[in-house]
Image: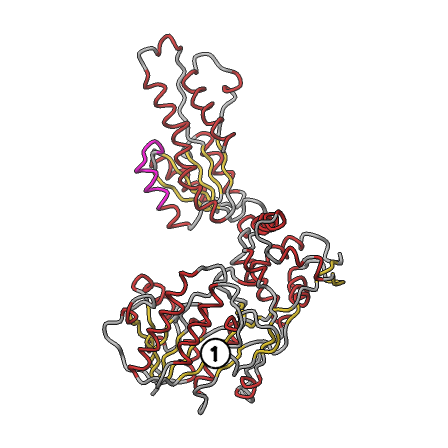
Amino acid sequence: MATYLVTGGTGFLGRHVLPLILDRDASAEIHVLVRRASVARWEALVDGMPGGERVHPLIGDLTEPGLGITSVPAADHVVHLGAIYDLTAGDEQATTNVDGTRSVIALARELDATLHHVSSIAVAGDHEGPFRETDFDLGQGFPTPYHRTKFEAERLVREAEGLRWRIYRPSAVVGSSVTGEMDKIDGPYYLFPAVAALAKLPSALPVAVPRIGSTNVVPVDYVAAAIVELMSAPGRDGQTFHLVNPRPQPVREIYAALAEAAGAPHAAASLPGGLVRPFLTPTPDSALDTGRKVVLSALGIPPVLVENMTLPTVFVNDDTREALRGTGIDVPRFASYADRLWSYWRENLDPDRARRPHPAGPLVGRHVVITGASSGIGRSSAIATARKGAKVILLARRTEELDAVVAEIRATGGEAYGYPCDITDDESVEHTVKAVLAEHDHVDMLVNNAGRSIRRGLYHSTDRLHDFERTMAVNYFGAVRLVLAFLPQMRQRRFGHIVNISSAGVQGATPRFAAYVASKSALDGFTDVA
């Protein structure tokens, strides 16, 4: 029976490695380093995983002295997956990538275990030309703190005395070639929105793609399978493995595969790279560099990604291919799984996915909050909105009338939920908004319909300031209170639609409605500015 201690087990790569270890060795026991704040995430990970009862949490943290572990279990293998994989991160990642590795090395020595260190092709830095698995320090420079910290971490492993180790250097890891699953926007995924924008053009339209070089991407399932296989291979201690595509992938090839998947214009020609090279290379303190950053920011692309999108290095992986010969583990062609990457991104990671209306209608499946929904315009709007296929979330003070509207909508096949709420009360609104978001995840649309009207001549209101305070509390402050409450999650989802019910009285300055018209005028002013 082999025992494993794994860091980064709840991360993207770790979630693919753990099931493979369990499947390969039916008696394996795995201890996963888990931060106390991530225990729930770990529990969700192992719940339902075949063999999950053999995976145990080990409370600790890569950034703490001694990994923060109070009791160390025995282990034959220490699998170090934990790291910050982010080109945009600064020197702060050294705490995890370098100091964390130092602590992991000490732990592996204490346990007399083999250390399996997951490094990165980033250790090659800006080296031009071939970089072999036996290569390490060739005098290369490091374009980002990420490159440097991965190099320093690997050097600690290589120079550790009395340590048995194996090192794995993946290239840019994308989603699964089987399911397309990916956990975050990273690396080439920053370019997906640009492809989505091009997909709005006719697919038959030819485009020219600049010859700016090649990149190297591999799917996560290949990386995980290769690591687990190579961990178990006899006689491989002291070796480094390049988990890369053996053939550099031109940017045009990557674009062509994604364009095919997205229905975007196809790449029909190549442009000289020199035409766009100035846009890709930083020129500090220049107007061109400022413009470059503005454009990239608008596209949501970190400048550092563009600067390091192509590689001057060719990664040789002869030793890895030889070690995996006969296992059936090989890097699939990017074009063979690009459609799965694209579909998963579009449904789960596209920052604008919430903006896409349902093919059956713009309100189908939308979560619509309507205030003052127990009667009048609110009740009629809720019924009509539910009829259009929306999930209607009704807010009102009068519980019995609210329940009656919910029952009426459900009786005709609609989906409705009622929440008693006084929109003039901070605590009531806070409680209701938390409940709505907890139970329905998000709100797409907010209809501020709740209102209060007072018809009274100004002369008869000279001793009734509360007439003005009460109308403002509902018609203005109540609406603003809800806008502010729902706005953060709308911004996070990059979609939101707010309808504020005003009054024709604002234009007509109707006599005897000073309090009411003033409150609606305030709401109009807020709406115009917002």
Q: Is residue 178 visible?
A: no
On the image, the x and y values in percent for residue 182 come to 50, 65
Q: Is residue 115 left or right of residue 528?
A: left
Which of 391/335 is in front?
A: 335
Asked if the magenta segment contains residue 276, the reply would be: no
On the image, the x and y values in percent for residue 248 come to 63, 73
Give the residue furthest to the top.
459
Which of 198/241 is in front?
A: 241
Which of 431/222 is in front?
A: 222
Q: Is residue 208 visible?
A: yes
User: Residue at horizontal 38%, vertical 66%?
Assistant: 96
The secondary structure making up most of the magenta span is helix
Q: Disc 1 residue type?
A: Tyr
Give the residue furthest to the bottom.
235
User: Residue at horizontal 31%, vertical 38%?
Assistant: 428
- Span of residues in magenta: 423-434
On the image, the x and y values in percent for residue 422 come to 33, 34
Identify the element where label 1 is drawn. strand
> In the image, is residue 390 above or below residue 518?
below
User: Residue at horizontal 36%, vertical 70%?
Assistant: 100
* Residue bearing mark 1: 168
Badge 1 density bin: few <14, some 14–19, many ≥20, Cα 10 Å: many
Q: Is residue 465 left or right of residue 444?
A: left
> In the image, is residue 144 above or below residue 503?
below
The N terminus, quarter of image: bottom left
On the image, the x and y values in percent for residue 425 come to 32, 33
User: Residue at horizontal 33%, vertical 80%?
Assistant: 108
